[in-house]
Image (cartoon, rainbow, N blue to C red):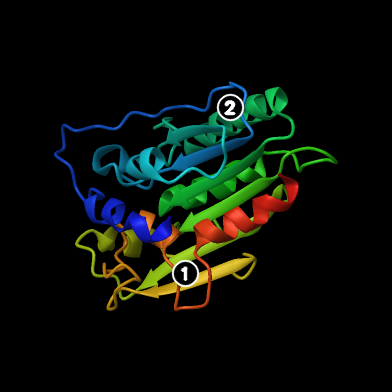
Amino acid sequence: MLLGCSALVAEQPVAAPAQHLYPQRPLQTEPAELALVFIGGFGDEISGIIEYMARYLPPLADKEARAYYHWNGGVIADATLGYKAIADSITAFRQRNPRADVVLIGHSMGAATALKTAELLAPATAGQGRILLVTLDPADRVVQPIRPAAVDWWGNAYVVNSQSDHDFIAAWGGRWNHCDQADSNTRFNGLRTDEFGYEFIHDNALSLFLSRHGSISKSLYELIQQHLQPEK
């Protein structure tokens, strides 16, 4: 299935017209066995990088709930209130679906939001669904990459030598790069191409998640599948 994803990567938007906005789609409490919570970076509501990923990432479960948030949770005045709003919606989902796993997927500053949101969630108890964290090229000078207690597994992917025209945003924001407390760290070089022949750039979050590093290691997508499988 992964080899068929190169077209998705190629079509991923890098920049959209300023008037093309991508509104949040909060997590609902409908029955599901897995929730995927996508959190975009600074300006993602205009560029649609993670919103695209939220729509087209191949399914990880038969019955999924998906949500999309901006890095500030839609609360412009105080991002900490945005973290709480996202965490509250996840908590409501978990109450309705106690055995469902939740995967927080954040890109750039949205990765920091995913981590801060996870800090507000209660750790899983026996028989309860787990919290998994995915950080894609994470960046934030204020938030520190310290593993939240609720996180059962953390996968991180980042780019060095990025060739993106928008990479100054990540550089200004303060890249985390390797996260010592993550379970998996994947380092890509923007001067090279991925297994599909596409460049690793800061904007290309979907490729960071789907692509393997070398011929042996698994992609973050495959690692998430592997981690979820024993409980299913």
Task: Say which quarter of the image contains residue 99.
Answer: top right
Instruction: Tell me the element at label 2.
Output: helix
Q: Is residue 186 above or below residue 7?
A: below
Number of residues whose C-alpha sits closer than 10 Å to that of mark 2, classed few (under 14), some (14–19) or many (20 or more):
some
Q: Position of residue 105 (x, y in %)?
A: 50, 48
Q: Position of residue 133 (x, y in %)?
A: 59, 51
Name the one closer to the observer, 112 or 127: 127
Does 144 sit left or right of 168 as displayed?
right
Q: Position of residue 76 (x, y in %)?
A: 39, 32
Task: Say which quarter of the image contains residue 131.
Answer: top right
Gap between marks 2 and 1, in whole Å? 29 Å
Q: Quadrant of the C terminus?
A: top right
Badge 1 amino acid: Asn
Q: Residue at x 63, y 59 (%)?
A: 146
Q: Residue at x 57, y 49 (%)?
A: 115
Instruction: Tell me the element at label 1.
Output: loop
Residue where numbered disc 2 is placed: 89
Q: Position of residue 104 (x, y in %)?
A: 55, 45
Number of residues whose C-alpha sits closer than 10 Å to that of mark 1, classed few (under 14), some (14–19) or many (20 or more):
many
Q: Residue at x 53, y 54 (%)?
A: 134
Residue lying farthest right?
A: 126
Does 178 sit left or right of 49 as displayed?
right
Q: Is residue 44 above or below residue 32?
A: below
Q: Is residue 145 visible?
A: no
Residue where numbered disc 1 is placed: 177
Q: Quadrant of the N terminus?
A: bottom left
Name the one closer to the observer, 112 or 65: 65
Q: Earlier in the sequence, mark 2 or mark 1?
A: 2
